[in-house]
Amino acid sequence: MNDTAMHSIPGAALDHLVVAARTLGEGVAWCAATLGVRPEAGGRHALMSTHNRVFGIASAAHPRAYLELIAIDPEAPPPGRARWFGLDDPRLQAALGRGPQLVAWVARVADLDAARASLAAHGIDAGRVLPASRMTPQGELRWRIAVRDDGARLYGGAAPTLIEWGAMHPADALAPSGVTLAGLTLRSPSASPLRGALEALGIESARFTADAGRPALGIELDTPRGRVRLDASD
């Protein structure tokens, strides 16, 4: 995916990438060692009993993109449902024991209900729409996000999680990190529905590969430590 085109769903864009860690402490250490950056403070997600750290990865093609480092919050009570981004999946938790993993990408849309319907028309269940929030020094961030009841990633992470932001966006308060998004690659054997869904969302699918190769999602980042490639765990 070279660029974000805006066709069927006005405002559709790559919003952020999600890297999961067993603990935020492990994630912060990984960021410093692998990317040469220390993520900024994030917050707690009461809805999912998770917490995060964030840093900007904006580029000319993706001017408000950021990376979210997320982990299960050990101080929060069980959420009473499956967490987002497959965080309760035993296979993913086993992979996190080996180190933080790229798990998903999130697409920002202006109309989440319309975007969700567009995916449904291509046979993709994006999940139910949930309101979420977290506190920041600038105030409360509010958003709506589509999450499946089982918490599963769509097409193993090749299809995006959909988000609709309220008045504030987290990237607006992020200082330059020295890391930029250089590329994103998607792979799936289910070529027709996924490609059609991306096009319906107005997202250019030039970097989509119609095969069963693993991983389903890969990114390249330009960092203080040079070009770094991350691949999603299946």
Image (tube, helix red, strand yellow):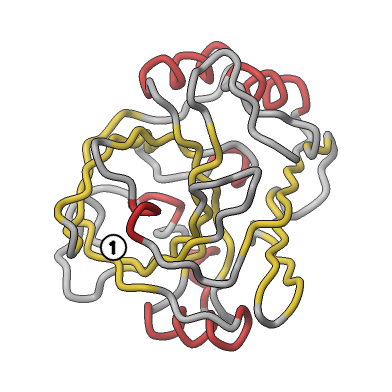
Query: x, y percentage for residue 135?
Result: 16, 58
For the residue pair 217 and 189, the one nearer the viewer reads as 217
Crowding around mark 1 (Cα neighbors within 10 Å: few <14, some 14 to 19, many 20+) is many
Q: Quadrant of the N terminus?
A: top right
Q: Quadrant of the C terminus?
A: bottom right
For the residue pair 58 and 49, the one nearer the viewer reads as 58
For the residue pair 201 and 182, the one nearer the viewer reads as 182
* Residue 25 as seen in the image, left or right of residue 96: left
Residue occupying image coordinates x 34% and y 66%: 52
* Residue 41 as seen in the image, left or right of residue 17: left
Q: What residue did someone put label 1 on?
A: 50
Q: Callout 1, which amino acid?
A: Thr
| Total count of labels | 1
Residue occupying image coordinates x 59% and y 22%: 6
For the residue pair 120 and 17, the one nearer the viewer reads as 17
Query: x, y percentage for residue 36?
Result: 59, 83
Depicted 71 relative to depicted 24: above or below = above
Depicted 125 relative to depicted 70: above or below = above
Query: x, y percentage for residue 229?
Result: 74, 67
* Residue 168 as seen in the image, left or right of residue 46: right
Query: x, y percentage for residue 35?
Result: 61, 78
Residue occupying image coordinates x 83% and y 38%: 209
